[in-house]
Amino acid sequence: MKRERSFLETPEQRGECKSLVKSALAKMDGNPLSKILAKDTFTQLQNRYSHQVPVFESGFIANSAFIIDKLHTPKGWFHYLLNLKNALHKIAISVVAQDGSGVLSQDSVLHGPITKLSGNENYMHVSQVYRNSRVVWIKTASGKVFHLNPQPNFLRRGGTQDAEKYKSFSCEQHPGYTVIKARRRGLDSSLRIFVPYELPGEIWTVSVKNVSKKTASFSLYPEINFGLDSHPSHYFVGMAVSEAEYAKAHNAIIAKNLDIKNSFPRWGAFISSEQPAAFDSNADKYYGFGASIVYPAGIFRERLSNTEAAQPLKGMMGAFQYDITLEPGESKQINLAVASIDPNLDITAQLDEWQAALKPQAVKKELAKVTAHWQAIFSSCLIKTPSPAIDETFNVWGKYQGIVCSRFNSPYDIGTRDVFQYLLVNTFCEPDFVRTMIPFLLNYQYADGRIPRQICKFSKLHDLRNFMDCQLWAPNLVAQYVRETGDFAMLDKKVGFLADDNATLLAKNKVSVYEHLIRAVKSAYENNIGAHGLCKLGYGGWNDALDGLRGDKSESVWLSQLLVFAAQEVRCLAQWKKDTATETYMHNLIENMSRAVNETGWDEKGYYIFGYDNAGNPVGSSKNDEGQKHLNENSWALLCGITPQGRIDSVIHAMDELRTPFGMRLLIPYSKKSAPEVGRIADQAKGHFENGSVYQHGALFWAAALLKNGRADEAYAHFELLTNENRLPDITTNPPIYHSNYTAVCENTDYGKEPYYPFTGSHAWRMQFITELMGLKMELDGLRIDPKIPTVWRESVENGQVICKMRKKSFRKELPGIAFLMEIYRDDAVKAQNTMKVRVNDTAVRQSKGRYFISLEHPVFSGTAKEIAITVCL
């Protein structure tokens, strides 16, 4: 009889789940799956592969461990680890799936790999293939070889799973580290991986315990493959510049790329905390000849070859051999590092530092430092609502994803429009990093106010496509940062420009950050208005895939709306600085662009169009054969407040056609016949990516727009479709702790799938939506209290009970060390009066100019109290 393995499913279990998922998809009606399915069914499917273990702090979820219980998940469930240091360079970024697969890179996933990168690097970053895995092999005294932890779909003769030989498996993904555990042949093993706070690399701890009743003798072989490709790619043979050296005094294999044309010079090192019995660095020797290698030939020999690789055909790798004997109950622990080494600095000093970091107490101390930093980030702002799924996202994994995005340069290097949005999360939980990034980003702005689409930190090969929206995201970030911190000195900080040669960062003629923002707005306005009074599109706006519209005469409604949004932020800062000239300029711009959008951007069917092509023909209009409605232009008309009151209902009604059970789709899709007019978007499958999927950015813009216009119930209903209340891993294929950039919808077989991983500027809008719901936000001159609680939350409690609460740390320089604790109560008597009552430290706050607001000069801030209590009744 086959032994049961809880981490492996039987065919019957798989069949049952497949039937339940099929039924769930068929039942979707626009309500969250959690409300459509029976509670037990929804929980069963949501927890099919994993579960979460929350950690509470004063009643709030303040941390969480994500435990993967099943070896086979819909795809590799990668975890993301990184240096948390406040720095611009030498940031290690590590990707680890539940089987150990993934890569280590520095500064850029695609152009800074330290270990071997394979797969769709542009968005997926890694795929689960053999040569980008971290592997630890065990060879018993009798010569049997197996992995330390089971591998998905690693098949034995006859097609049986090798994983059936293991008694247990689990993978714990914690903030900042991951632990893979397994048991086989009487050996309990674990592989823990984390990235230190500062050192660029990852630290492994391999632990093995003999839980049998017999002496266990075996050899242990940790293995990696180096990937040190040159940047930029050029015509040469990489093998010819590849050499590895074994530094015996440091137990380190050093892999070198000696290409003098490499603009991103870096070496890699595999370092052991103790002297191994043998090593290998030559893939030709270790793997042997052949394309289909399952077991490396080297580990079947008595000893690894101790070869220092020199121009190896199969590349440089690293493997150590440890010969171990454990008595019953005895255990062995080895620390290792996979490190990025700077060849321009003292190599010995770098190895010394890593060796010191691998001492047992040092490893323990460093991991504690990393986890403590994450905890400080999480505890900076916590909520407790009727939705634990939203709490866990906002309090823990949402901040984690946001900070990973802000440092993790995903496809190429730093996308300016992307990072300006990523950093919105950091403003309220890690503002020091924003303080570093704002001048860095603005230094790449041209003197005319534009900024490249992407900037490269380690070469001068910037992405120079003229996307006119990139610079317009800067004012929102800077304004948010100043509101949260009170760091008004940032506005006066002097920053230079990128020269017209597209390479030189100018040290002279610096201007203030505030002036940079003014120029950003002017660059999209002055000499950039088309025949219809709208902003010219340039290379493109938010929807990159509409690249057939780029040109000198095409115009964009959305870009015009974003310009208004940016000008509103600059006007706010100008008012604070008493800069009346700029305030007037921005006011006039807002009036002019709002008028143009409403006059020439309005469709006769009652909604806003995309804009006009180079021939002056409308796009995203009822006059078009395809793509007649686009969501963003209508979201942003509401979001930046330029829609006349009489048109709001019309816009909302018109967008109903874009509803799906997974949220609002981006547009009515195009077919290939439209490709000559609109570009590559028409080559994409309908319902995928920008061609009419539920693009998280677009769906969250819509929810934010409804919320801003006082429609909290509608906004929350749309938002809830984007949360874990409406996500099942068998449908999305993604782990619940991360949110993707889009969901495929009904025209294709990928219905409900989230093909990509969590690098998306939309996540900042998810976090901001939750913040706006709770309504406790810093303004330039005080604290705004403006909760927008949906009815479904209110009705989840009885009259007089707490609906939700929020604890927020102040980062304001004027309010150091203060925390705000806001509790929102259901009060039917107050509700009947269509009003709200607010008390701060038991003192009533009166509504003024339509809002509840506490000035920084309020007496409540003058005492020594470290916590300020805010009570809201509604």
Image (cartoon, rainbow, N blue to C red):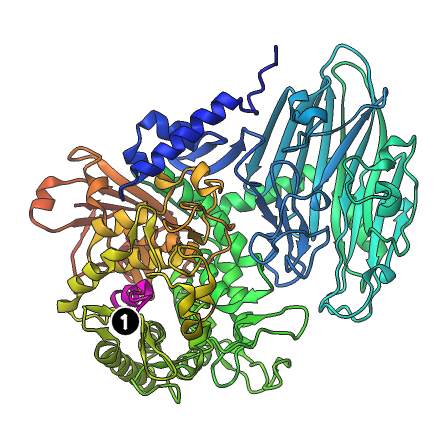
Residue kind at label 1, given as amino acid type: Ser
Camera-side residue: 398 or 109? 109
Magenta stretch containing residue 268, yes or no? Answer: no
Residue 301 versus residue 120 in the image, above or below? above
In this view, which residue lies farthest toward the left? Answer: 833
Which contiguous range is marked in magenta?
Answer: 625-638
Q: Quadrant of residue 482?
A: bottom left
In the image, what residue occupies the spot 83% across and 43% down? 290
Q: Work out whether residue 867 can be spotted.
A: no
For this view, does 72 lie left or right of residue 294? left
In this view, which residue lies farthest toward the front? Answer: 673
Camera-side residue: 610 or 616? 616
Residue 144 versus residue 337 in the image, above or below? above
For this view, does 781 lie left or right of residue 269? left
Q: Which residue in the structure is indicated by mark 1?
A: 621
Residue 827: x and y in percent read 14, 40
Residue 768: x and y in percent read 36, 55
Camera-side residue: 517 or 162? 162
Q: Quadrant of the N terminus?
A: top right
For this view, does 589 lie left or right of residue 143? left
Query: Secondary structure under badge 1?
Result: loop
Q: Work out whether residue 447 can be spotted.
A: yes
Residue 658: x and y in percent read 28, 56
Q: Quadrant of residue 761?
A: bottom left
